[in-house]
Image: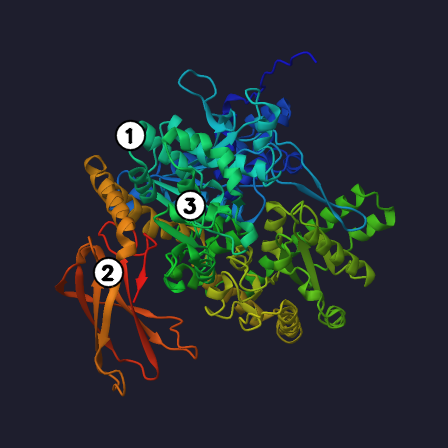
Amino acid sequence: MAKVSTFTVVPKLPKRLAKLRDVAFNMAWCWDPEAVELFYRIDLDLWAEVTQNPVALLGRVSQARLEELAEDVAFTAHLDRVSERLEDYIAAKPWQENNPDSPKNLEIAYFSAEFGIHESVSIYSGGLGVLAGDHLKSASDLGLPLVAVGMLYGEGYHRQAINADGWQQERYPRNDFYNMPLELVLGKDGKPLTVDVDLPGRKAHLRVWKLLVGRVKLFLLDSDFDANDQDDREITSRLYGGDRDMRIRQEIVLGMGGVKALHAMGIFPSIYHMNEGHSAFMVLQRISDLIVEEKLNWDDALESVKSASVFTTHTPVPAGNDMFLPEMIERYFSDYCKKIKLDMRALLALGKQNPEDEREPFCMTVLAIKISSATNGVSKLHGAVARGMWSRTFRGVPEDEVPITSITNGIHVRTVVSRELGNLYERYLGPNWVADVLKQEVWDAIDKVPDDELWRTHAVRRERLVAFARAKLHAAMKRRGASGAELHSAQEVLDPEALTIGFARRFATYKRASLFLRNPERFLRIMRNTERPIQLILAGKAHPQDNEGKELIRSIIHFLREHDLRNQIVFLEDYDMNVARYMVQGVDCWLNTPRRPMEASGTSGMKASANGALNISISDGWWCEAEDLGPNGWTIGAGEEYDNPEEQDYFDSESLYDILEHEVTPLFYERGRDGLPRPWIHRMKAAIRTCTPVFNTHRMVQEYADRFYIPATVRRNNLRADNRARSNALAQWKKHVRDVWGKVSFIDTASDSTEGLEFGSRLTVRADLFVGDLSEKDVTVELYVGPVDAHGRIPRGVPVPMEFSEDAGEGVKRFTGAIDCERTGRMGYMVRVVPNHPDLAHKHETALITWA
């Protein structure tokens, strides 16, 4: 075919409407209700048709309509308000005002494989991406100096369609970058900026696009242009698509290409935050840069990179952590190792829990953990699960001391709270409820809201959810060629006044979407109670390669047809942020049924609670922390974990039925003379009051800043001072310790009499330790004290420091310590030693430990 010459056409806005472009090209509009109203005021039908994409809207609205709006005094006044508010928002410096002691050079680079900002920018699949998007929104609101890096997928994640048999089918419509709020980043020569990453026998070339998210810049990498061959153009085609070879190329592009792109734009962050392990190859690029450009050796470069890296793991399911066979790493990184004169075995060891195991796959999560100064899970329970999953990385360290902490996820409240409820909050909680989302006293004021107003506001959202579900179901049935009678029936499903329960998430089997069908007879009896009707709205996608998840969807749809429940239970296809928004704003209860402890956090229940919905959830993820805060929902089971999945499913399903039958429905339908379910409304207020000020991304991002970003930046600054003198000294110290640690051993341990110790007394312990070439300052010696179990082990101990007391000669140092007898019963102690240096990020950073 003849070559096509391209050109770009942009909307011709009347001068009076010029500011519309600025508003449309900053995603801050999507959490500003007045900005949303501004766009659908232009053309409501077209706004829905273009998936609420303001750039596409401006490109398709008629010139006559634009000229008409330019003369509309009310519209232009509306535009001025929105535009001025955006300008003031961008100009403000809240971070510096509220965090005056923050390091002046603080700047975070936040890397994620997906970002869910809004459904009109389709580069996300689910919870991980939406969480990343909310992270950016709160960073913007707080003014935190942060840039973000991701991928610009030509087809994004799949769109879901359900065929007549109930089987999920996928389609991949192309993203039209030129009708999205994106701009190509230009180089100094005025041409699109490009960077390269090395692949076997070739280079892949990457363009960089910019998306504004309030005050935050999100840079997105794109390989789909003529400089690449067709195979490499596909790298940024689909999110989580392709085979392992495609996955490693995507992760090289994200991690290594992302670092190169930032540096090419003159951005050198103080801290790099890896949101899940997909971007972990970034550490290799940064190490290489230091070796090649600053002539550091491997150990010094690794130490420098580690001091400026933090990592968040999201996946408690082993299969969800990317792993590559050693030979694949060798294929893709042999030239890398030659370039920096590194033995391949040293590189492979970074991605293995057991570096001596030649066949252990290279794991991106392990790489990220090893080259980060701080690692966290996304809820308290997930932190504990992650410590167990990755404990072999720190052999000999008790599981509860594995250096993985937790920062519980949150939500961007202004994005998810309905416009109607937001107006209610403003009226009774005050106009600053968005800015003061962390203040408990703001949310305590929810009790000032009259019960009837809160109930009417929620009833409106339930009605809109039902109307939305009917329209979406009608469109899906029409696409499948349904008859006129079937299409008419779609307009009558669901009852706007019935108790409405929502369930929406990825259809992975461990999330147990069909748990409510475990005992069909009992479930049908509950559903067919005409005096207390219940209805369910379900949504969610299965991964294209997950046939078990697809079968789960199919089995549910067949069950609904077989038992004629289609008026009470509706499955909404093609779950996205728009569907989620209607659901969390309109349901009365949010159902969450994962197999504990496999839900890392979950955020959809947080979104529902911010809108006054009550959670019905397994005690897993975030709900473990929320369930005891007040009467804000119901917990399925008692947090038990069973070895037999069938047994666990049975007991959890029976608990769910009991909750629905004996607690939820009676409370919902208990009405006073005024028709209000006041006990239910009081629970709604409790959910809003207890969950919203805690489970939000303002708290989460501030916590990342206080616990990770700022301390890591301070530590990095100290280590980099004087031409990295302390960093290089720490690297050399670590190398020396690793070389001699095998000789460190306990010669003897002894204590006072251990029998019949009285409560309140003290037990003195002595330990003689051979340290060889090390000094007493190079080690920390501790007692590990706790109750002894039936097997003679200490399952969960407490460290008690021992002090250096004397030099016994010939490399032997004596340490003494004392145990306070503050608990009765059979107790035990062990003695251990770990390396010690004032510049270590944490005491188990070296992953070296010796027990007596």
Nearest to the observer: residue 244 or residue 355: 355
Task: Name the residue beneath numbered marker 3.
Answer: 349
Q: Quadrant of residue 676?
A: bottom right
User: Horizontal placement of 69 versus 333: left or right?
Assistant: right
Q: Residues within 10 Å of mark 3 (few under 14, many from 20)?
A: many
| Percent coordinates x, y for residue 536 in the rendering | 69, 60
* 41 up-or-down from 711: above or below: above
SS for dot 1: loop
Identified at 52% across, 32% down, the residue is: 24
Q: Quadrant of the N terminus?
A: top right
| Percent coordinates x, y for residue 203 in the rendering | 50, 24
User: Horizontal placement of 135 versus 7: left or right?
Assistant: left
> Which label's residue is closer to the chain start, 2 or 3?
3
Q: Residue furthest front?
A: 810
Task: Name the residue beneath numbered marker 1.
Answer: 295
The amino acid pointed to by label 1 is Lys
Asked whether residue 248 is in view, the answer is yes
| Percent coordinates x, y for residue 139 in the rendering | 40, 44
How far apart are the alpha carbons under marks 1 and 3?
A: 23 Å
| Percent coordinates x, y for residue 302 in the rendering | 33, 40
How far apart are the alpha carbons under marks 2 and 3?
A: 26 Å
Asked whether residue 714 is in view, the answer is no
Nearest to the observer: residue 384 or residue 613: 384
Identified at 36% across, 42% down, the residue is: 144
Q: Are marks 1 and 3 in contact (CB under 8 Å)?
A: no
Q: Are marks 2 and 1 in contact (CB under 8 Å)?
A: no
Mark linked to residue 763: none
SS for dot 2: strand
Task: Name the residue beneath numbered marker 2.
Answer: 780
